[in-house]
Image (cartoon, rainbow, N blue to C red):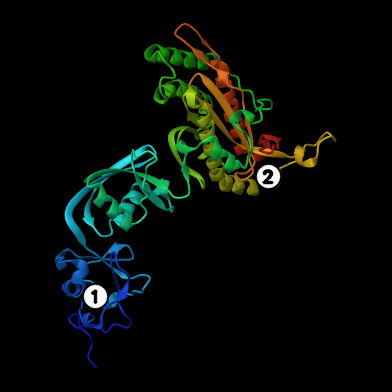
Amino acid sequence: MSIPTFTQQLPLQQPLWIQIEGTEATALPAELLSCSNLDRLAPKLCEKYKEVLKNTSPLVLKFIFDNQELRRDTILSSLSTTGGTPLVIRYPLSGRKFRFRFHLSRSSFKKDFPHTTGLWCLVNDAIFTKWPNEIQDNMIYLTESGRGNDKIEITSDFDLLTYIEENGKNEISFSVHIRGKIPFSDWQWRDILDLIKAEWPSYSYIPPMSFDGLPQENLSEKEINLLLDELKKNIIAFQNIAENEMTCREFISPFLTAAVSHFQTVEKDLRLHAEDFLNGTRAYGPIDYTIRSGGLIVCVTEVKKDDTFEKGVAQNIAQMHSAVEKLGKRKADVLSESGSMAEMKSRKPSQCSNSHSESEQEEVPVLMYGIVSNGINWAFLEWAGPSDDATLHISARFICSIDADSITGAVQVLEHIVSIVQSQINAIKDPSNCRHVKRVKCR
């Protein structure tokens, strides 16, 4: 019995399934099975399928298997294909080159692509490589940037190739969307009603938030003066606080920086983050500011001009929802280890009025805080309970009046932020210290 050599074709034990991109998978015809490797198979394919490949040179064929491009010296008998996982044949459609720019929220990149079959696969690979943490394992689709409501969703190779053929441009800007989710920037009040199963006509119907019971921190005169000096310097430089959201940030970040700095001599793992990207089950995108303790988000801040304040509240609630989702598993692990899980889920006050039912008296843990501000107006939000059963509260607006000669309201705003951060730090260190509030139905 002779031993097969490298020049001999090993017999195929099963059919070789191929799929020329844009067609259905099929078993390789028997007369082509004698080809020893992909390089020898290429000219045979061009001859056999000339109506599909349209005079394509064998030299430009690419062979893809399991999302990897194969070398042309790959032995056919080494491939284990099926109708569901065939050997894919990719070929150029023309000599055109494209430059695509992709936008995901506030991040973007550009990349050049050939005019080829499988262009959607190449685009997907580029996007997932650029944004692995943001996209994760979610399905995506594209729309052309700047088209307003007149947008065509691109979800396949056919969609993309058809679109660029009709578009006629070689440089196109696309927006990347995550299927089944709404970017934080697009959330409206009606979306929040669906999220929390509420019937409130507007955010003004959210029950009021109380600061009673939050820890009170003493701010030093030095800390207060540093904040006031920073605000005075900014108002002299900018003149107008709420001209646009970027200007608003210059009058919001000093408060958040001062609050985080207040604790950092002791709390070494407390951090302030800008443009912190979060991907929840219903929403995604960058958050203007987050405060994290030990990696856990404790507060999310949305910067919004006054004329879009309601939308800012909606966005902030969506951000809190995603943050609570991310917080859930990690915090649940900590709580189960501490033996405090049952207490954190809900509890009944030790002393209750008989005039209220048990459900009305049930208390739920506060898991997240939110802030919406334009630098002048400040509103604080409180999310209690799990992500699928929220109890929400919102504070009255606090006014911070800033001009070159005097500043009023700034110290009170800073004190509230510091109290919120301290409360969250206490809860992370010892779950029994978690702040609880009475459950409120979102109706």
Residue depicted at x 37% and y 37%:
106
Which amino acid type is shown beneath numbered disc 2?
Lys
* The furthest residue to the bottom: 1
Which amino acid type is shown beneath numbered disc 1?
Ile
Left or right: 208 as drawn, with respect to 242? right
Q: Distance between the residues labelled 2 and 1?
A: 59 Å
Q: Position of residue 136 (x, y in %)?
A: 43, 51
In the displayed structure, would residue 420 be above or below residue 94? Answer: above
Q: Position of residue 172 (x, y in %)?
A: 26, 44
Q: Where is residue 138 in the image (x, y as percent from the top left)?
A: 44, 52
For numbered disc 2, what is the local secondary structure? helix
Whether residue 266 is visible to the viewer of this picture, yes or no, is no
Residue depicted at x 46% and y 37%:
186
Q: Position of residue 373 (x, y in %)?
A: 51, 25
In the displayed structure, would residue 82 be above or below residue 247? Answer: below
Give the residue pinned by disc 2.
345
* The furthest residue to the top: 405
For numbered disc 1, what is the local secondary structure? loop
Q: Nearer the viewer, residue 225 or 443?
A: 443
Q: Nearer the viewer, residue 54 or 300?
A: 54
Q: What label does residue 426 carry, if any?
A: none
Q: Which of 206 and 236 is in front in this view?
A: 206
Q: Nearer the viewer, residue 194 or 239?
A: 194
Left or right: 405 as drawn, with respect to 49? right
Q: Which part of the image, by quadrant, shows the N terminus? A: bottom left
Left or right: 190 as drawn, with respect to 32? right
Give the residue pinned by disc 1.
75
Q: Which part of the image, by quadrant, shows the C terminus? A: top right
* The furthest residue to the right: 354
